[in-house]
Structures are given as C-alpha cells and as structure tokens.
Image: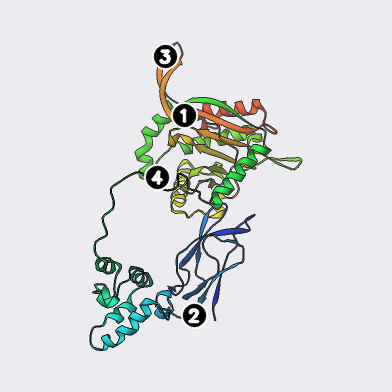
Amino acid sequence: MPTDIKVPSLGESITEATVSKWLKHPGEPVAADEPIAELETDKVTLEIPAPAAGTLAEILAEEGANVPVGAVLGRIADGAANSLTHPALRAGSPLSRIAGEGAERSEAGEGKPVALERSGPAVRKLIEESGLDSATIAPAGPGGRITKADVIAARGPAPAQPPPGPVSGEREVRARMSRLRRRIAERLKAAQNTAAMLTTFNEIDMSQAIALRERHRDSFEKKHGVRLGFMSIFVKAAIVALKELPAVSAEIDGDDIVYKNHYDIGVAVGTEQGLVVPVVRDADRLSFAEIEKTIAEYGRKARDGKLTIEDLSGGTFTISNGGIYGSLMSTPILNPPQSGILGMHKIERRPVAVGDKVEIRPMMYVALSYDHRIVDGREAVTFLVRLKECVEDPSRILFDL
C-alpha cells in the first residue's frame, strides 16, 4: 500500500511552506528517512525525510507549490524501484525501445541492455536526452554499469563556444521572491510601520578588547576548541546593560509591557537565502567559550541550511555585526516584537583625543535602534554608555561592575 509523504508540523505560527526542490524523481528508490524533498518556510529550509523505504511513485506537489501543514506531497510505493517504472523506460519511450531491441543482442553475448538496467535513473535520463543508443556505450562502472562519464564520452567533445560578444535578449530578469525573502520584507516593513523607531550612536575604543583577545587567543582555542571572537564580549556586555535597563529587552503586548528576566540573545547571520537570527538562549548563564561555540555552530548550520525553527524562535534582544561586511555605520531595524537591536561595525584605526594627546586607536561605532514607545532616550543612551564601559574594560564584566 502506498505511503503518503506529508508536510510535517513546521513550528509555532507557521502554517504553510513552499516546495523548494525534489531530491528524488518518480521511479527512483528511496530508503527510510532519506531526504527526498526540501521545503522553504518563512524562516528556514527543511529537508523532508522519506517516511518509508520503497519507490517514489508520484509527486503531487511540484516545485514552487505552496502547501499547508499536513498536505500530501507525494507517495512512496512498497518494494524496491523497478527500472521500468522510470519515465525514461516507460512504454513507447526511446530507451524502452532500445532496451527491447537490445534484449536479443544480450543473449548473443553483448550484454548492453543489462548494463543499461544496472545503471541509475540519472544515467538513463542522460542517455535519453543525448539521443544515444545504450548498445553503443561501453560500460566502465562497477558491475558493468554505465556511468555518467561513459555517456559524456560517448557524446563526444562539446561544441566550441562562440567568442564573447554583446549580450542580446532581455535587459531585465524577473525572479520570484523566495518565501524567506518575502517574510523578511514583511517583518522589516512591519517594524517600521508599528514601532516608533529611533537610533542612537556611540563609539568604542577596542584597544583593551583586542589586547585581551591577542593575549589569550591561542590558549583559549587550545582549551575550548573554538576561536575567541569579539561577539562573546559584546553579548556579555549587552547583558550587563540589559540587567540595568530592562526596558530595552521588553516588548509590548496589547496594553501591557512584558519585561524579560531571561536573556536570549539573537545573533544576526547573513546567508545566501537571506538574513536569519538564531538565538543564544540563557546567554547570561553561559561562559565566553560556550557563547562562541554556540555562535560558531549556528554559523555552520546557517551555511549548510540546517537551522531549525527552534534555533530561530524567541529572542529578547538582537546583535547584528555589519562590520564583517565593511560597514562603518548603520541604523539597524528592529526584529519584532523586540524593542532593541545593537549594531556592531567595522573596527577602524583613527586619531582620537586621549587626555591631552592625540593617539591612533582602533575604534568602532555602535548603534542602538530602539522602540521609543517603551524605551526613553535616557535609557537608550545609558545602555550604550554601559556597553562601551564593559567592552573598553572587559574586567567590569568579570567583576559585575
């Protein structure tokens, strides 16, 4: 009996997804729990595992289709894949004729149709698209299989490409926005329309933080297996400031203000698909090493598209580091329903007045965007001053000053 492939529960507030890609084609064998499709939600891209072993019998939701939770994406038939169920070998197709015509030749010892049937679906499809006769292809794969390299060799050299010239055709290309990009656009515009957003700035002398990092970098990495970066220092400094100024991590719920006594810090990460904000939970209870490990793991998962809904849910305050892209100054946009976001920027050596002298120091501009409905200017400015004090003298974090 066929097994339905259904859209799983996607997490709180997410009711539908978009079929991003099918990893298997009808007629191909699948193993239980093997990824067979990718779904794109408002937050992440998820792999859908096969609910049972067998053959992918049919696809009911094509790529690009929007599907609600619980919808049937396709069906898996019982048993191993039958090579004749592949579209390339259905009755009347060129390969079915090739296989049938070659059956008599195989009895004479040629064995080419056997090699064809032993080959994978992708190879059979490539043979059909190339218009080749499988009997003319010498199999070099294990077990007498025809490989993709064999097919490419049989096709001969590719035709020479014409020399570069003026680009013809359309001057513009229209592409459909991904679900993640649409969601980002909606949330950012909602933040502008809802919050009374304002940004205040300060600058930080990074000399002590850099010296601390240089002094302990090797021993820190040797002991903890992760590099000591500036983000853990800023996370800890932000928590010190948030404890003193709880309105910056509060949020508005109707006519109420909800103050948070926990510190789940979102760290903005840029990916090819868009900006995502995984959350370092209970960061006040974590060591510098634990924060760096968590951020490094999120970075790897973001690059590999492995972030889960749970990784991105919640968050009481966000830190965004535009400095990694070279940004000198910016006004970050709030991440609703949060009321504050800290923007870090590029460290640049420039002359500053130190006492009665002018010295060259590594300086960083920092920005705090906040919701003026619940955060007053005094609180916002004080937040950055406290952050500045902690980063310029990290011992204040250690001694809770």
Tell me the element at label 4.
loop
Residue 307: in sight, yes or no?
yes
Kindly identify the amino acid type of the residue bearing the numbered disc 3: Val
Mark 1 Cα-neighbour bin, 10 Å: few <14, some 14–19, many ≥20 = some
Mark 3 Cα-neighbour bin, 10 Å: few <14, some 14–19, many ≥20 = few
Mark before the other along the chain sequence, 4 or 3: 4
Mark before the other along the chain sequence, 1 or 3: 1
Kindly identify the amino acid type of the residue bearing the numbered disc 2: Asp
Query: In 3D space, how far apart are the residues under numbered discs 4 and 3 (Cα atoms)?
Result: 36 Å
Query: In 3D space, how far apart are the residues under numbered discs 1 and 3 (Cα atoms)?
Result: 21 Å
Name the mark nearer the viewer: 4 or 3: 3
Q: Quadrant of the N terminus?
A: bottom right
Name the mark nearer the viewer: 2 or 3: 2
Q: Provide the residue designation for mark 2.
A: 78
Q: Kindly identify the residue that appears in the image at 52 percent across and 29 percent down.
A: 366
Query: In 3D space, how far apart are the residues under numbered discs 2 and 3 (Cα atoms)?
Result: 78 Å
Query: In 3D space, how far apart are the residues under numbered discs 4 and 1 (Cα atoms)?
Result: 27 Å
Q: Provide the residue designation for mark 1.
A: 328
Kindly identify the amino acid type of the residue bearing the numbered disc 1: Leu
The residue furthest right is 255
Determine whether 132 is above or below 283 in the image: below
Q: Provide the residue designation for mark 3.
A: 358
Mark before the other along the chain sequence, 4 or 2: 2
